[in-house]
Amino acid sequence: MKAALMEVALGAVTAAVAALVLVPTFVVLKLLLDAGLEVMFPSVVGFGLLLAYILRRATVGR
Amino acid sequence: MDGEVLFVASIVAVALVFDFFNGFHDAANSVATVVSTRVLSPLQAVVWAAFFNFVAAFGLGIHVANTIGKGIVETSVVDERVVLSALIGAIVWDVITWRYGLPTSSSHALIGGLVGAAIARAGTGVIIGAGLEKVSAFIVISPMVGFIAAVFLALAVLQLYQRAAPSAVQGVFRRLQLLSAAAYSLGHGTNDAQKTMGIIAVLLFTTGHLGGEFHVPLWVILSAHAAIALGTLFGGWRIVRTMGLRITKLEPQDGFAAEAASAAAILFATQVGIPVSTTHTISGGIIGVGSTKRLSAVRWGVAANIVIAWILTIPVSGLIAAGVYLIAREL
């Protein structure tokens, strides 16, 4: 019973963390879309490529 | 029933068959993770995904249907032959790429088909540049957003559970995957079914069956969602047989991060009225989760095939549809 309650509590915390990550991400996307595709496209693609580069550096040798 | 009505009804049926196969083809994306992690039995997973594909008919709007119906080509040039040619162009391209294992998007094929058939009828002047530009940009943006959101989500989860016992992590994410799979199926149902709705609505509008104003009738909304849900149900069964023989090794927390990030990306695109490839978006999410462990763990061959599919789908399905229209015009 205690373990089940703990799982439910952890699940709620995780869902809240997911919302904290996803909601701001999509607020930024909406702002970029409102600024126009000429702003949104290079921003999203550039940031994605930068993130991939950082992950490559961080995970090299694993 | 006169011949013209019968012809329109037949094209509506072809559009719904296209929608059914969209669900059939994409069922793997909706059920693979929850089945492979044994959160749900295959039967439960398929019913779960199909249910949320259908439920997506209620409350998520019809912005994508409006974009497809009146935001890509001028409605004045769309007639029965244009719509039929667009559907045939998309179906032929889907079959060719299925045969060669290219992960193409049925949505992009449909848009390419519509553009190709419209150009064949009335030239390039009928294309609504802003609409096509937005759809084309999101071919790249949507999977990239799936990738970025999945990376952030996977890192947040990793941080949150770094000291937790593996058994506790498994328990939590087995349950959370139910939610993420449902959210993904909602996104898949609403974005993909709306493309078929848009095609049917523009056909009904231009043939005078909708009255003076473009709108999407309720029966079109419900039948498009029913078709995609049935496709998922039957397509899921096919996947289930494969899964029974070869279960993919997948951690529940990875499936959760990839599905939740992709669902959010698809629902975002749906709310701003942009048709996106649900398959490419979840591929971006899966690549994102894989990248947080080791970039070389990502199967870059799959990513390269997706890029090839991006480049080819709209022009080739457009060329096929244009060819079909030119033949149909002479009949």
Image (cartoon, rainbow, N blue to C red):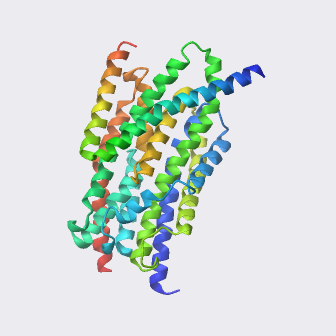
Q: Position of residue B105 (x, y in %)?
A: 39, 50
Farthest residue in the bottom direction? B2
In percent of the image, x 49 and y 87: which residue is there?
Answer: B2
In the foreground, A27 or B64: A27
Above or below: residue B279 compared with residue B107:
above
Figure label count: 0
In percent of the image, x 40 and y 53: which residue is there?
Answer: B275
Above or below: residue B325 compared with residue B58:
below
Above or below: residue B10 compared with residue B234:
below
In the foreground, A30 or B136: A30
Residue B284 in sight from this viewpoint? no
Name the quadrant of the C terminus of chain B.
bottom left
Q: Position of residue B43 (x, y in %)?
A: 67, 44
Tell whether B82 sits left or right of B6: left
In percent of the image, x 52 and y 69: which residue is there?
Answer: B217
In the foreground, B106 or A10: A10
Tell whether B254 sits left or right of A30: right
Residue B47 in sight from this viewpoint? yes
Q: Position of residue B277 (x, y in %)?
A: 41, 48
Q: Position of residue B122 (x, y in %)?
A: 24, 72
In the foreground, B99 or A48: A48
In percent of the image, x 29 and y 41: which residue is there?
Answer: A40
